[in-house]
Image: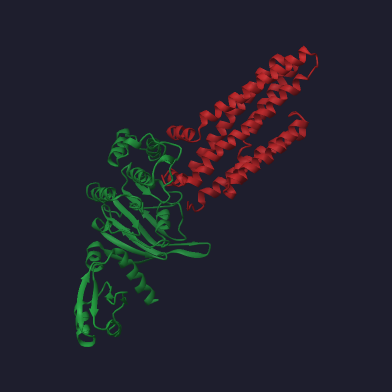
Chain colours: A red, B green
Amino acid sequence: MFKLLKYELKKANFILVYAVFIVIVGAYLTAIVGVTNLSNYFTVGVPPLSLVMSVNIFTIIWTLMLCTYLGIELFHNEYEQGSMRVFFASGLGRTRILLLKAALLYLSSMLMGLTVVLSAFFAGRPLLKPETFWPYLSSSAVLALVSSSFVFLPLAIGLLFKRKIVTIFSVVGLLLVIGGSMSVSSFTNRPTQILIVTLATASLASFYAVISHSANEDLLK
Amino acid sequence: MSGTMALSLNHLSKRMQGMPQIMDISLEIQPGEIYGLLGVQGAGKSLLLSMIMDLVRPSIGSIEIFGQRLSPQNNRILAHVGALLDPPGFYEAMSVKENLEIQAAYTGLHDRQRIAEVLHDFSLQSAASLRVRDLPAPTRQRLGLARAILHRPGLLLLDEPFTYLDSMSIRFLSDLLGRLALIHNTAILVTGKQVNELIRVVDCIGILHQGRLLRELPASEVNERVNRRYQIRSTNPQTTLQALDAAGFSSVRLLEDGVVEVADSEIDADLLVRTLADHGPKLLGLESQQATIEELLLDTVAQEQNRV
């Protein structure tokens, strides 16, 4: 099983994707620190919490985008190239194979979520007072954990229609909903919490439904 | 697994979008047997192979591989099956060697030496580190074949394996299939539209047309029957044609150069000569020609259509 995981990571260029993620988040954090220092220098007084919250939104957006790429590589491309047929015909069991891929995608998303928490820690600690910092960090951790499943909703819709473009447009729609909601309120806001948790549940449930469907459908190509 | 059939299809049927695609196919392949499945484009050959690989589920009927009934809950037996499907389905961005390594991982093969062995056998050493997307069609085909036999399967399914291969590779593959069947007791189901090369190695040929298995013939019988084709030159080709028609010969046709050809696979040579002598015009020549196996296919299909 570990060998299969290794090849799945290799197929999806996971190391490259994660390296890109780290570079993007790192660059954004550097920019945040730069802006904060500049605002202090000019005594403009940008609210630190807004800046640090923007790290969360920024990293969630990038997590979703990069995990969509991984999802397309792990699912769509394998169906399109016919290599999924070879995988399914190996006797490992279709449901098992699809769940393995889904677990890998979820773990990748969690890893990126962990990066969100780490970036929130590094960005928030020097900028926030302790009484603001710890509640912020814990809410970031919950957000990261819950939002790790977001990628499954657009992927489920795309796989149902067997079109990459549907997945991509669904991601754009989801980003607009999440980004829009979080830019006008923080995660500690009750309606946003309900939205996020509902989306996460819908994502996992819809993806499982698609896996069950795919495990039983005829695969001609 | 000894004593059981390598593959057994029992009244297999498949309907797709309300249309019958595979109709009541039953066949059996023993370990060590090479079965050639002959059919034109769209006959259902690839679909049948996909059904055996559990990629397409039958509407009616069952599939048994080495005595185990294939089902979504019981498909571990597929680890003993090797297949070259169309399209082969490679990981295009990965190298030739990595594609073989992945197949080894899928099928639980831990013998790394085996990968080097098939790379050598299929002359793929120099392409081992190349990405699959950069390979020419013949090399891709050889990779597909190498991948199919990598884990030493007991049952091998090959969908038109001779496509894209040069004559050297065709000869090599024919010999390889013979060796696999003879030495390793591998059961092989191979499909094709042009299986003249295969006739040297197959034990049995099944003719598939519009989703139905029209006929199964042992290779010896195919060899014997497929080659019967007579070309008749006479002073009046039209009269010859009519005489043969009246005598009940099927598949009689007038060629462009005035030669009348009888290509019935079950032709009775004595009756032909008697008919021509009694009812035909003056004979200028009568020669027996070698027919191709494709003509056997067309002949069988024509007979089937006449019967319907």
* Residue found farthest to the bottom: B279
Q: In which quarter of the image is the N terminus of chain A?
A: top left
Vertical order, B202 against A141 (above or below): below
Percent across and percent down for residue A176 are 71, 38
Asked whether, in this view, residue A129 is left or right of residue A65, the answer is right
* Residue found farthest to the top: A41
Q: How many marks?
A: 0
Name the residue nearer the viewer: A155 or B297: B297
Please tell me in which quadrant of the rendered image residue A194 appears: top right
Percent across and percent down for residue B25 are 38, 63
Query: Is there any visible trace of residue A93 in the rendered image?
Result: no
Name the residue nearer the viewer: B225 or A4: B225
Vertical order, A89 against B201 (above or below): above
Name the residue nearer the viewer: B36 or B80: B36
Percent across and percent down for residue B286 are 20, 76
* Residue found farthest to the right: A44
- Identify the residue shown where x is 50% and y is 46%: A79
Please tell me in which quadrant of the rendered image residue B121 appears: top left
Vertical order, B176 against A55 (above or below): below
Percent across and percent down for residue B12 are 41, 61
Asked whether, in this view, residue A216 is left or right of residue B186, the answer is right
Query: Is there any visible trace of residue A107 in the rendered image?
Result: yes
- Identify the residue shown where x is 41% and y is 52%: B70
Name the residue nearer the viewer: B258 or A15: B258
Asked whether, in this view, residue B231 is left or right of residue A48, the answer is left
